[in-house]
Image (cartoon, rainbow, N blue to C red):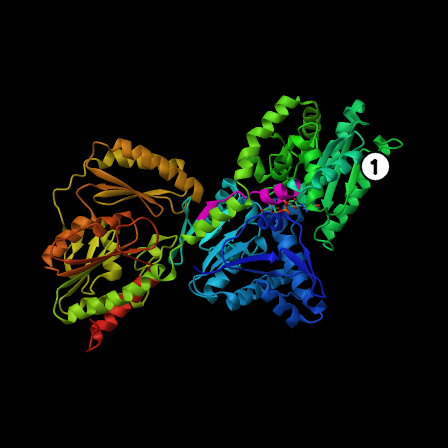
Amino acid sequence: MGKLIMVSNRLPVTIEADGSARRTTGGLASALEGADLPGEQIWVGWPGGAAEDFEDLEKVRAELLESGVAPVFLSQDDLDGFYEGYANSTLWPLLHYMVERARFSADWWLAYQRVNRKFADVIAEVADENDQIWIHDYHLFLLPAMLRRRKKGLRIGFFLHTPFCSSEIFRVLPERAEILKGLLGADVIGFHTYSYLRHFRSSLLRVLGWESEMEGIWHDGREVHMGVYPIGHNHAGFDEVMRQPGFPEIVESHLQDLAGKRMILNVERLDYTKGLPQKLAAMRRFLERNPDKRDDVLFVLIAVPSRLGVQEYDSLTEEVQREVGAINGEFGKVGHAPVQFLHRGFPLADLAAFYALAEVCLVTPLRDGMNLVAKEFLDCQRPEFSSRPGVLVLSEFAGAANELSHAIQVNPHDVDEVATALNRALEMPDAERRNRIGMMQGRLRKQDSGAWTRRFLKDLDQVPPTDERAVIMDLKSLAGQIAGQAHAGRKIGLFLDYDGTLRDFVDEPDLAVPDVELPALLRDLAAFPGLSVAVVSGRAPAFLEQHLGGLGVTLVGEHGYRWLDGGEGEWTLFNPHVNIEWKPAIREHLEQASLLTPGTHVEEKQSALVWHYRKADPEFGSWRARGLLDELTSMAANLPVTVHHGKKIVEISSLQVSKGAAVDYLLQAWECETALVAGDDQTDETMIMLTPENIEFHAVRVGGGPTRAAYRTDIQGMRRFLDELRAGLRSNKPNS
Ligand code: GDG
């Protein structure tokens, strides 16, 4: 097994200009600290600061490399455009649904691309074939595809720590297509919740028009797996500090400071997504409504400074400071200010003590990928350290809300609701508090950051190694083998689907005409003595004859209903007794569906009916198609038909007609000794599944999806195969 290369914008440590190191605060850093990563590792990331400020860049690089860290040094220009600009002023607000905060600049986009390339450069230097690369977060959306182009044989995972916003928001981003394609360079893409995965899939559909499955998407000749991996907190780290002999003293000293007040705790990186102003509004409402509790409670707001220098963050700090002052001015008294704003970080042991002592933990972000504070608070609730169990008040817009259903969940925008929840939490009887904590704590401790890491890396590990993925290589030797057999005088049949196999799909099927090279290629192949070629398509005869007639290639139309021997003369039916009496009733049903679904229409073929939804709204269209499929399947239970869901179509065709049956017929008629079938969808599987006796039979699936074919490739790979076969046929001394 190769090594693990962890890649994040920030390293888990910040390196000062003199080379000394300091720990970074934030969700990613603290989760990974407890993750207990396996095997040999290298961390790749920005060490903090601008490259210009380091006294001796090369010395720092060499020292860091020795301790397993490969730094990506960024210039002040990079930092302005990439970090403060595109990552934190464009992507961060958009991903958190704050469109009005998002700012756009072409220069920032250039810097974002440049810095992603710098990361790719550093990784390419330290990575070897079969290493696992685990890329973290929105700063590096372009990196998976860049890296894949740069270096073969890597297993690339990507995890997004933020939400993935609805496609309606994501579409706002000018570079939306590039970002999605960049991400699809990964083998495994992970999200915290199912909703984020769903939004990502609808963005693929709405921005790129690419349909995907829940588990992933076939892209660029490989399977990109998508999954839901809710991150856990660093249970081991908190457990360790709480077990230390000095911990009770730390708790005791904070308890003294509280002087009998009931602590309502808030811990966060100071960020507008965490909703501190809204939280302060709720505190104010609570204090207004509950004068009897004003002297009892103490709101402790720990807010670690974050992204200093970014304008939004500086003004947020000022806004919070002003409001804290105003609330204390209004509701405080000599010796007691109800709100304490601590604008700094604390050591983990102090944080654990705060969590243990809090009666209420107020976690009310406006949007949050997961939120680890909520989990850490619950974990630190241990009866030996506090007189009363605590209550979690949690925003329904935090990813953690999916898992923590026994918290009091609130809408953070609803000031009244949060104020009421605060009061309810303070009044909650101890038995209920304990019960709620118990329901959540066990699971959290098991699903900690270590479990999260293991799950993600296990899936990354299951990505097949390069040589298994490189099916196109196999086709090359297959081309040589078949050319050799043709030269040796064996009778060979090639049965090739058209759309999605020889030619890409386009929005308008009539425009999917063959490119200039295809007719010549097919003609050359069919001209070789003993080698017969058939294009086996679902298309109507007229289209096939117009574009592929007269080439010496046999045309099979309407999924095997009729054929044109050698591409000229008269079309013949494979089976003149096919039953088509079922058509009127089904046609009426399909026409009804078209009326109700704008952008769809019914195509009538001799032995089939096709409902096309290529031009419908993509989600509405595929939802309707699934419904139609159910209806037709039950309607057709006693009819001699099959129903099939193809690429943007639902097709009902006679049971007696199939591509497989047509190919079976031609295999005999042509007395084939070797045959190759190739296709990209379920109708082609009827040829792929044939098992003709005494014939060497090769089946190729073009693109993704379940198949019985032994070979898999993409359209380019298929065309390359045919080119190589032609070259083999032309050469005097064939490979065998
Ligand atoms: C991003 C996503 C997602 C805070 N103050 C102190 C301190 N912290 C630690 C907490 C916690 C971490 O910072 C904050 O993590 P969050 O998950 O709450 O939020 P983000 O930093 O925004 O993280 C988030 C996360 O990535 C992981 O995927 O959950 O949604 O936005 O661990 O303990 N740590 C110490 N002293 C402090 O004063 N030692």
Position of 453 relative to 440 (above/below): below
Q: What residue lies at 26% left-to-right and 67% top-to-bottom?
A: 477
How many discs appear? 1
Please tell me which residue lies in front, 232 or 276: 232
Quadrant of the image for the C terminus?
Answer: bottom left
Quadrant of the image for the N terminus?
Answer: bottom left
Position of 564 relative to 729 (above/below): above
Image location (x, y in percent) of residue 582: 21, 35
Crowding at mark 1 (Cα within 10 Å: few <14, some 14-19, many 20+):
some
Most distant residue in the front direction: 245
Most distant residue in the bottom direction: 732
For ligand 1, the image quadrant comes to top right
Residue 364 placement, left or right of 480 = right
Image location (x, y in percent) of residue 167: 52, 45
Residue 96 placement, left or right of 592 = right
Image location (x, y in percent) of residue 128: 46, 65
Please tell me which residue lies in front, 33 or 151: 33
Q: What residue lies at 22% left-to-right and 61% top-to-bottom?
A: 549
Please tell me which residue lies in front, 223 or 660: 223
Bounds of the magenta segment: 226-242
Find out whether residue 615 is within the magenta segment: no
On the image, numbered disc 1 is attached to which residue? 326
Most distant residue in the right direction: 334
Q: Is residue 497 visible?
A: no
Amino acid of disc 1: Ala
Q: Is residue 546 visible?
A: yes
Image location (x, y in percent) of residue 574: 14, 49
Please tell me which residue lies in front, 342 or 139: 342
Helix, strand or loop at mark 1: helix
